[in-house]
Amino acid sequence: MSLEHNVVTPYCTDAEQESPRTKAGIKEWLGLAVLALPTILLGLDITILYLALPALAIDLQPTSTQALWIMDAYGFMIAGFLITMGTLGDRIGRRRLLMIGAAAFAGASVLAAYAPSAELLIAARALLGVAGATLMPSTLALISNMFFDARQRALAIGIWATMFALGMALGPVVGGLLLEVYWWGAAFLIAVPLVAVLLVAAPWLLPEYRDSHAGRMDIVSVGLLLTAILPSIYAIKEFAKAGVTPLVVVVLAVGVAGILVFIRRQRMLSDPLLDLQLFASRTFTAALIILLVGLIGVAGMMLLVTQYLQLVAGYSPLVAGLWMGPPALMMVLAGVLAPLFARRFRPAFVIAGVLVFSSIGCGMLALVDAATVQVSQVVIGFSLVYLGLGTIAALGTDLVVGAAPSEKAGSASAMSEMVQELGVAFGVALLGSLATLLYRVQIASSIPAEISDEANSALGDSLWAAKSIADQLPAGMLEEAQQAFTQGMTVVATVSGVTILALALMSVLGLRHVQVIGEGGGQE
């Protein structure tokens, strides 16, 4: 039988904390295990294609721009629909939306697995993003609905954040294992059994969550939000491909106009899609910026490192995935230990200290020699980068939600999730596009005039395109392409390292007023 509840805030009264009736029992912890399934799945789907991309490129022959769309259309659509789906869940029920979205996610995964062309795969990834947007806010909202005790709820949210980060970390490893036995489409089909377990267990272990006072969904705001996000990203991709063109200027202007009109409309509405008053909190704003910028740097480097292991070092997807194991372990350790350190040291200093290590890791990646293969240096450097991701994933959500008034915790949660998805997607788009641009500049002067038009086009497009026709290239040209890719990766690593180091300083300045976790509610 469904149990309906009104909105549950992330805080409870002292009496509630002391009452044994508010303590979660075995059913709630089993329910958390059920919620971990879509959480891990969402993380997996962000990164599982990183190792599948070379095999996919050989099969579907996407252009470099199409390849980037295949990677990040999913994240952009999630980010675009998160707030909308959060409002919809309040109206129809969080558990119901979770189950509907999970079923849609499995169906879209099957479509993606058997997509016959790059265009159809991009469309399937976009559908996956819309379905995924129903899962993220539902899982976090249901955790607040299931765990009334403050300490238990903090632990449950920490596990939730770690599961999402763990899914992102395991993506390359799982992708490598699947590609060793199956074809690239198997990376999508992993969603089907996980969703099946969720659909069977959810009615028994998860309560329903519905806000009887939920406001009307503003469809105009939904359209404006998409108008703000999607054209902006398209402009970034076209700029990386063709530079400043009239199309880039016009599309970017549409995106900026969408942002401005969206903000203005939210200020006018009595029940806005996004409550802009949340940004009045310094902690809220600073934590969101740290999540966004930090994930941009980490996600962009993740894409390049996984390509380096396959396209430059020459490893199979399985071996490359195994090399990604140490970074994954470092991220999980950071996710577990960061909250413990934050009980003794202020979160600002925990985040800043770990980000300094991440910037050192970027420095190691920036010093990779383009003329030789240096796998150990790449893996150690990227392991340090991943320390930052684990720390941000563990502490970022708690800082964002904790900085918001209790009655606005749902909106704060949706913003945290949207920013994380945007960070990953922007990282792939911005740093992936920068690496592609640098590759093309480097390789252009090395392409001999006598090669075929097909080889010329492949070499000038990307390393994976060049490797797909390696037998048609003159002697030494593939090595030239690999060096051009590595040089691009080192420049991107330098940019990421400087950005992350600046972010460490910002975390100290923007979050230094936040107290040690467990003291005074977390903030001064």
Image (cartoon, rainbow, N blue to C red):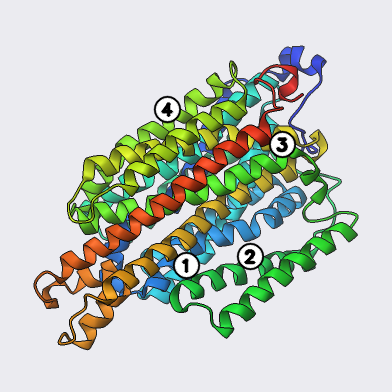
Helix, strand or loop for disc 4? helix
Identify the mark nearer the N-term, 2 or 4: 2
Q: Which residue is mark 3?
A: 283
Q: Which residue is mark 1?
A: 124
Quarter-wise, where is residue 21 in the image? top right
Instruction: Tell me what residue is drawn at x 48 percent, y 25 percent.
Output: 336
Within 10 Å of the Cα at label 2, are there few (<14), some (14-19), or many (20+) other Cα atoms?
Answer: many
Helix, strand or loop for disc 1? helix
418 vs 126, left or right, is: right
Q: Which residue is mark 4?
A: 333
492 vs 512, left or right, is: left
4 or 1: mark nearer the eye: 4
Identify the mark nearer the N-term, 4 or 1: 1
3 or 2: mark nearer the eye: 3
Marker disc for residue 229:
2
Mark 3–mark 4 distance (CA, rounded to whole Å)? 25 Å
Helix, strand or loop for disc 3? helix
Mark 3–mark 2 distance (CA, rounded to whole Å)? 24 Å
Mark 1–mark 3 distance (CA, rounded to whole Å)? 37 Å
Mark 2–mark 4 distance (CA, rounded to whole Å)? 33 Å
Residue 177: give x, y in percent of width and height. Answer: 26, 47
Residue projecting furthest to the left: 475
1 or 2: mark nearer the eye: 2
Under mark 4, the amino acid is: Leu
Q: Please state, as top left, top right, bottom left or bottom right, where the N terminus lies in the image.
A: top right
3 or 4: mark nearer the eye: 3
Residue 370: give x, y in percent of width and height. Answer: 23, 55
